[in-house]
Amino acid sequence: MAGGQERILRRRIKSVQATRKITKAMELIAASQIARSQARIAANRPYREGMQRIIREAASADPAAARKMLATPEKVDVAIVLVIVGDRGLSGPYNSSALRAGDRLVHMLQHQGTRVRLFTVGKKAPAFFRFRGLDVEQSFTGFADRPTFADARAVAAALAAPFVAGEVQQVLLVSTRFVSAGSQVVESEQLLPLVMPNDMEVAAPTGLKGYTEFEPEVEQLLTELAPRALESEIFSALLEGAASFHTSQQRAMAAATDNADELGQTLSRIMNRARQDSITTEIMEIVGGAEALRSGK
Amino acid sequence: MASLRVEIVTPESALWTGDATGLMARSSEGQFTILPQHTATVGDVVPGVVRVATSSGEVAFCVHGGYFQVGPGEEPGVTRATVLAGIAERVGDIDVARASRAKETLEAQLASPGDLDDLSRAQLTGALARAELRLRAAQH
């Protein structure tokens, strides 16, 4: 019956509007977090650049010592892969694209005969990899939205220990880089051995404007610096990941809100037509009845 | 004119940036002072108080270990000194009550013969060292 259909439609519209309220709220929250997480990236920049400067100075002063910490190994038997994603979903392709890139990297390494030890940041990662039959050695969760330096330290400590012990020859990172508000790119890069920010050979002559003094000696300094540089790199990856997550979520929720608007409009049009139809039918029935009564007289 | 530009930065923020007349800190090789025109140097900073002398007085920072780098700045005649610290704060910002509370709790935790593994013991010891340094720095 027409009245029943109208009631069903009214209920659906209500549910669409309730969903819209949620997505709109999430959109606004994410939008407010974007600015904050971008400010945190900017605040981290002087530290990160300072750290890279020190490593470059130290590396160009004593290339022999630097080679131990910086050179890419010829043969990698065991590698660590760290994948950074978010703790929450509803963020468009943010989680899945980083996870897929991580999955591809792991398969590529395994194909080359490298054993992979998998570390992850973010609640969304372990389930994904377990489903694909990959064991996650350690997963860090709970801070992907707002990472602190202490969190980065904890992750770095877990990664550095096997590298320093010589159990692994390479540590790789898969994370989302925040290029700009409009573009976030999933990238994989090498964390350990440390990679020079700019090509070292090119940087060496400009870096040496004179004789640089070191206290303590370069070799000792580099050994102590490497874990600090790792912390710094992981921290900036976490910060950029968080900013990318919020951007992605804001965009996804804006699209969801738009869709809910559109769906609500379509549904209320259908409902209005159904209501109008039932009114028209009723009038026709009344008129028809009256007509029949009059002609019967 | 020769000048010195000092930056005290932590991963979370640039704590202090400005022109200074000198920078005093302690590395693993001993106390040192950076003045304008200092030669390019890279080294570590052991936990302690880092003092920055400016034309309008001295600013002190409590630095819980880090590194420093001295090099030529962007403009000619400017020497740039950067102190990179994982954790650092201005001495004036230290909350003495909070630090002493933290010290007491940490000492109690370390003293109790609980089943602490090496990692958490190291973390507690590190936190205790920071609390003690804060108290010492705030007293000066």
Image: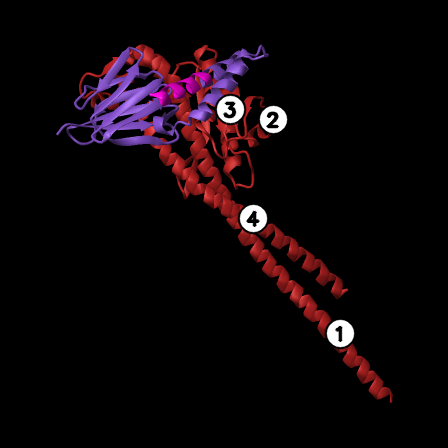
Which quadrant holds residue A211?
top left
The crowd level at tag 3 (other Cα within 10 Å; few <14, some 14-19, many 20+) is many
Report the amino acid beneath label 2: Arg
First in residue order: circle 4 vs circle 2 = 4
Q: Amino acid at mark 3?
A: Val
Q: Which residue is mark 1?
A: A282
> Which numbered disc, 4 or 1, marks the residue closer to the eye?
4
Earlier residue among tags 4 and 1: 4
- Per the image, the residue denoted by label 3 is A106
Cα gap from disc 2 to disc 3, whole angstroms: 13 Å
Point 63% across, 62% down: residue: A268
Q: Nearer the viewer, mark 4 or mark 3?
A: 4
Q: Amino acid at mark 1?
A: Glu
Which chain does tag 2 point to?
Answer: A
Residues A230 and B124: in front is B124
**Rendered view: A177 above or below A56:** below
Q: Are marks 4 and 3 on the same chain?
A: yes
Q: Residues within 10 Å of mark 1 (few under 14, many from 20)?
A: few
Quick check: can you spot residue A187? no
Chain containing mark 4:
A
Mark 2 vs 3: CB contact within 8 A: no
Q: Is residue A210 visible?
A: yes
Circle 4 sits on which residue? A23
